[in-house]
Amino acid sequence: MLSREELTEIIRGIVPEAEFPEGTQLTEAIVPAGKLVELTEKLKADKQSAFDYLISHTAVDFNTHFMAVYHLTSTQHHHLLVVKVKIEERENPEIDTLAKVYPTSEFFEREVFDLFGIRYKNHPNLKRLFLEDDYGYPLRKDFKDEVNMIER
């Protein structure tokens, strides 16, 4: 299992501009959106890190921006990593899909799209999972549903 320091050095070697918040339980890396696919491909392919499984993916709405959050693990080495990507654009948020790197991301990304409205470039089947196409995005902080009286 790689230590926090070892993981940090591997990630810095791939994405020098990555940020590493202190005081977190798991190792976290905040990376630019344009580096997400490259980082995950290299972390998966590298035998030392071998991040071969995407445990989960979600997003957080901070009113001013979104944060895409990915939890990765190595089934071989049993280390964990949280990768975050800040999405500044609120009107039409989008990020690259990880479907080719981690097939499990296909449904995670559809769920995030359905609930937050974040679009995934090059996703093989981006459509809503739960809600009707014109419903809105209920996990956004600015969501209002006049019919059902749901307001955030």
Image: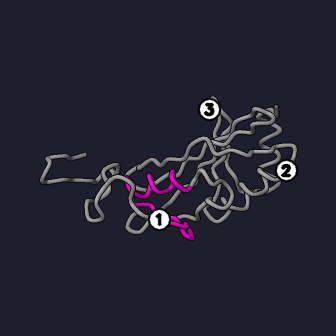
To which residue does mark 2 refer?
Answer: 46
Residue at screen point 79% across, 41% down = 7
Q: Secondary structure at mark 2?
A: loop
Residue type at mark 3?
A: Thr
Residue 104 magenta: no
Viewed as shown, does residue 93 lie left or right of 6?
left
Q: Residue at x 66, y 62 (%)?
A: 100
Does 21 appear above or below 143? above
- Where does the N terminus fall, quadrant-wise? top right
Residue density around tag 1, few if under 14, some if 14–19, many if 20 or more, within 10 Å: some
Tell me how far mark 3 sits from mark 1, CA to CA.
32 Å
Task: Point out residue 17 in the picture as x, y percentages from the top left corner.
Answer: 71, 57
Q: Nearer the viewer, residue 137 or 13?
A: 137
Which amino acid, by three-letter code, is at mark 2? Asp
Q: Please say if 72 is above or below 145.
A: above
Point out the tag, 3 or 1, that comes first from the N-terminus.
3
Is 5 placed left or right of 108 in the picture?
right
Q: Residue 126 shows which numbered tag?
A: 1
x and y percent of residue 137 in the render?
32, 56
Q: Residue at x 41, y 50 (%)?
A: 61
Location of mark 3 (residue): 24
Nearer the observer, 118 or 52: 52
Of the two numbered discs 2 and 3 in the rendering, the one whose residue sits closer to the viewer:
2
Which range of residues does the magenta coloring cover? 106-126
Separation (CA) of disc 2 from disc 1: 29 Å
| Earlier sequence position, callout 2 versus callout 3 | 3
